Image (cartoon, grey):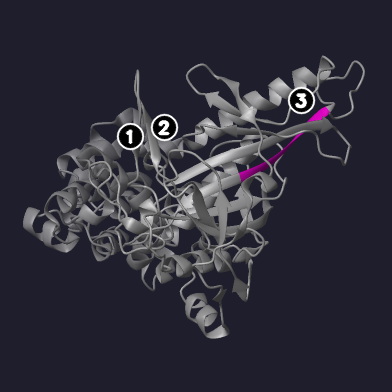
Amino acid sequence: MSSVVQNPSSTDFEAVIGLEVHVQLRTRSKMFTRVPTGFGEPPNTLTDPVILGLPGALPVMNREALDKIITTGLLLGCTIAPVCKWDRKNYFYPDSPKNYQISQYDQPICVGGSVEIELPGPSRNIMGAHRQVQLTRIHLEEDVGKLNHFAADSLVDYNRAGTPLMEIVTEPDLHSADEVFAFLTALRTALVAAGISECDMEKGQLRCDANISVRPVGATKLGTKVELKNLNSISGVRDGVAYEIKRQTAAVRRGESIIQETRRFDPEVGSSTSMRSKEMAHDYRYFPDPDLMPVKVDEAWLARLRALVPELPFDKQRRFFEQYQLPYTITSVLVPDRALSDWFEQAVGGMPARAQAVGNWIANDLLRELAAAGQTLADCRIKPAHIAGLVAAVESGVISSSIAKEVFVEMFATGDAADVIIERKGLKQSTDTGELEKWCAEAIAANPRSVADFKSGNEKAINAFKGGIMKASKGKANPKLVDEILRRLLSA
């Protein structure tokens, strides 16, 4: 047990947290057989003799899964082992048909590395503090089946068994539930952007166990850790960790010893209960798998994958700040979605000066319309060039910003380009100075009080004339010309 502080204050203890994150890789087939991966298929239909561990069935490695984990290692700055091997992790449980799991023990394929996280800023519109969370290792293994519990029975479905599973193990380098939430959010964003995994927690594609201990502030020795399981969402992980920190801190204050165990968190109740004593590595009796050869990763293999590693999300966000001068409010919407950020850059093209306007149309209007229509970006009829054309039409004075809203809605519905819609609906701004002078003169005559206010030095009074002019022109009056004509007439 950690040492006990007499009469401690609320700040006398700190949490130390390490995570074990399991991520199903996005591959067409399973880790050691050609059986396809999948979710939602009829129970026990995605199996074969290899998965079921039948006599004489031998595993064959999935090259795509190895590519995916090496890419992950390169993405997160890991050292890629020149040689890794496969081990059998022995345990007896109904979800493991062979009674062992093929994994990696003492020679993982990725060592070290880190994940950059962002903690919340003082407001949701301001970038928070960033730091690196250190990783211990990333190794590859096969997933196990799934137990489905009913009132009187438990049934096992082996469809998930054998799916390539990447385990990412952090150092005990996290100290709060908010940091855990930030880590999982950043990790998921990076892996989805790189095409490593879909990371859908509802489908079991990303699962997390948290190892939590508390110790007096300033201590270097770790306290007794508790593993927390049954964490089925990123917010659920945050809530479970927050509860466990409070539980352990209160227990230590009472002078109680923390038991090394595995606990289950119930998000409905908001508390954890003991499941079993925590296993140690020797309990699994690891030994090299005799049916699988070690894997040698040469420089040619690494070079091929290194060329495919995408830009990390936070690196892209910093680039968007510098290259496009975008505010945090827009980058925080664009960057987490690789397809959306790529779409944005296509719309900007070689015109960085238009980036702010393009970003606003995407973050505010495009995403709103997609959500209302229940569509994804892949379903969208608007093309990046259409947004660029709309921005150009506003900047060149062809249409006003208010008319642009109408054009955008039509673009979304039809997929037509902005210039086509503007021509078809006759939406071009009026630049006929004679007509504009007539509307301006009428507005001035109808608002003598505003005329007096403007001439007495109230610059804002000029806006009182513009509403009537826009109404008379049905929104087609060029705002810049209107302003110039009003000022000339009012100064006469």
SS at mark 1 in the image:
helix
Image quarter of residue 182: top right
Q: Residues within 10 Å of mark 3 (few under 14, many from 20)?
A: some
According to the picture, the residue beneath numbered tag 2 turns out to be 453
Q: Which percent across, then down, holds residue 85? A: 58, 68
Task: Note whether 397 is above or below 220 in the view shown.
Answer: below
Q: Amino acid at mark 1?
A: Ala
- Nearer to me, 465 or 358: 358
Task: Note whether 255 is above or below 321 in the view shown.
Answer: above
- Nearer to me, 94 or 318: 94
Q: Amino acid at mark 2?
A: Asp
- What is the chief secondary structure element of the magenta stretch? strand
Q: Amino acid at mark 3?
A: Ile
The magenta segment is: 13-19
Q: Which percent across, then down, holds residue 57? A: 37, 62
According to the picture, the residue beneath numbered tag 1 turns out to be 464
Cβ atoms at labels 1 and 2 below 8 Å apart = yes
Q: Residue placed at 72% from the left, 46% from the top?
A: 173
Q: Residues within 10 Å of mark 1 (few under 14, many from 20)?
A: some
SS at mark 2 in the image:
helix
Distance between mark 1 and mark 2 Cα atoms: 10 Å
Find out whether residue 127 is within the magenta segment: no
According to the picture, the residue beneath numbered tag 3 turns out to be 258
Find out whether residue 14 is within the magenta segment: yes
Q: How many marks?
A: 3
